[in-house]
Amino acid sequence: MIITKKLSCGAVMVLEHMPHVQSASVGIWTRTGAVNEAKNTAGISHLIEHMMFKGTETRNAKQIAEDADKIGSQMNAFTTKESTCYYIKTLASNIGKSTDLLMDMFMNSVFDKNELAKEKLVIIEEMKMIEDSPEDDIHDIVCEQVFKGTPLAQPVIGTKGSVSSITQNRIRSYIENEYTRDSIVVSVAGKFDEDEMAGMIEGKLSRLKENKAAAVPAEAPHSPTHRVKAKDIEQAHICMGTRGVKLEDERFYAFAALNNILGGSMSSRLFQSIREEKGLAYSVYSSSGSFVDDGIFSIYAAVSHEKAADAISAVKDELEKLKKDGVTEAELSAAREQLKGGYIFGQENVNGRMFANGKNMTLLGRVYLPEEVIAGVDKVTVEDVENAAMLVNDFSKYSATLITNRRADLKKWML
């Protein structure tokens, strides 16, 4: 059972009781991420997420870690384009201590200047790690290409220049204006006492600013671009992207099925054609990302440098087949079962339920029940998938990036 409760301070709690488990997950979500940042402070949401673990008025960074370990809890956080989440998974018997620790970090972090200087260096090392992982790097680049001119183009991690310039005062100002009560959702799943949870949260959030100004979505049409990045690596990495569907698009489930059919599984068309039949790639897949106001669809492959053009041609062929022949009922049936299986597997633990409820309430203002999701997948038809495919089956609408160790005429290959 899922209960939604609006606290008197204005924040929202989403509570899902799972009485058969002996654990609980508590997440504090705030509706702020890369899309809320100015260019000169790009990465500030992610930096704040790191700094929340670096000391409060009563605990230093080591004590935060030790206090979590003493009660057998697992604590972490993450930042996305549109939200930030701080969470702790704990034994049900220790939920009070765990929630107190999480709230202390969220409300009482001091953002010490020395810790801030060190954490900036840590994040710059994280940037280098992404640079050293072409698969991660290329997806970030293509996202910037597809959403150029909109806040979604901004990388979550920021840039070396923007992160280096962020000061203690800028962090406090950003938190004051973005970590507001109307943007906060506390999501709890597992075994817990509802009244106890509400009591631990209510008073502590009251000192936050009540609300923040509504953001005006920035719209910009996608104009395909092509980029080649030189790097001394053993494989060429290719990623192509175009606009997809937003979170509440009526085509959301059909688009998810289409992604599965095209490149979301081992039986998918791209995997079978490019890896199994042609032997061009070890890793090849498609992926879909949905946001509040927009979405992205991308195709990725890692191939030998001399086979990059062949792989791009093979992707083009598959998109043309999709446009010409559509999909079969057998493909759709398999996609439905894979989507339902993946969803259900992810919901059979307290973190999975906390994440799903917290994200949906934070970004969409509602919770999707499991039976609602399953029904949405089950009702998708072949016609629905083929209509969704019209968004992505035109090869000329794709931006692309190639990371390789040699000269390449990517623009020509994409024609």
Image (cartoon, rainbow, N blue to C red):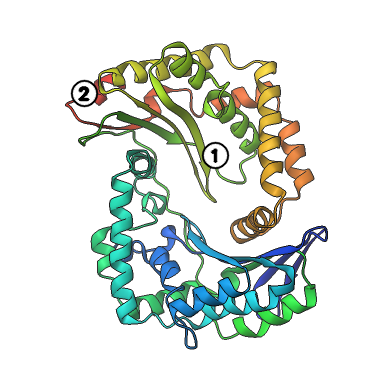
Q: Residue at x 66, y 34 (%)?
A: 339
Q: Position of residue 171 (x, y in %)?
A: 38, 75
Q: Residue at x 54, y 39 (%)?
A: 245
Q: CA distance from mark 2 to mark 1?
A: 30 Å
Figure quadrant of the C terminus? top left
> Which residue type carries mark 1?
Val
Viewer-closest of 288 and 246? 288
Instruction: Determine whether, in the image, residue 126 is placed left or right of residue 372.
Output: left
Instruction: Determine whether, in the image, residue 368 is placed left or right of residue 276.
Output: right
Disc on res. 245:
1
Q: Residue at x 57, y 71 (%)?
A: 69
Q: Position of residue 408 (x, y in %)?
A: 20, 24
Q: Secondary structure at mark 1?
A: loop
Q: Residue at x 33, y 75 (%)?
A: 116
Q: Position of residue 31 (x, y in %)?
A: 53, 64
Figure quadrant of the N terminus? bottom right
Q: How many residues crowd mark 2 within 10 Å: few (<14), some (14–19), many (20+)?
A: few
Viewer-closest of 70 and 338? 70
Instruction: Determine whether, in the image, residue 339 is placed left or right of residue 55.
Output: right
Depicted 134 relative to depicted 304: above or below: below
Residue at the far front: name it.
70
Depicted 73 relative to depicted 132: above or below: below
Disc on res. 409:
2
Residue 158 appears anywhere in the view: yes
Depicted 343 relative to depicted 392: above or below: below
Q: Please name which of the two marks, 2 or 1, marks the residue nearer to the observer.
A: 2
Residue at the far bottom: name it.
58
> Which residue type carries mark 2?
Asp
Q: Quadrant of residue 394?
A: top left
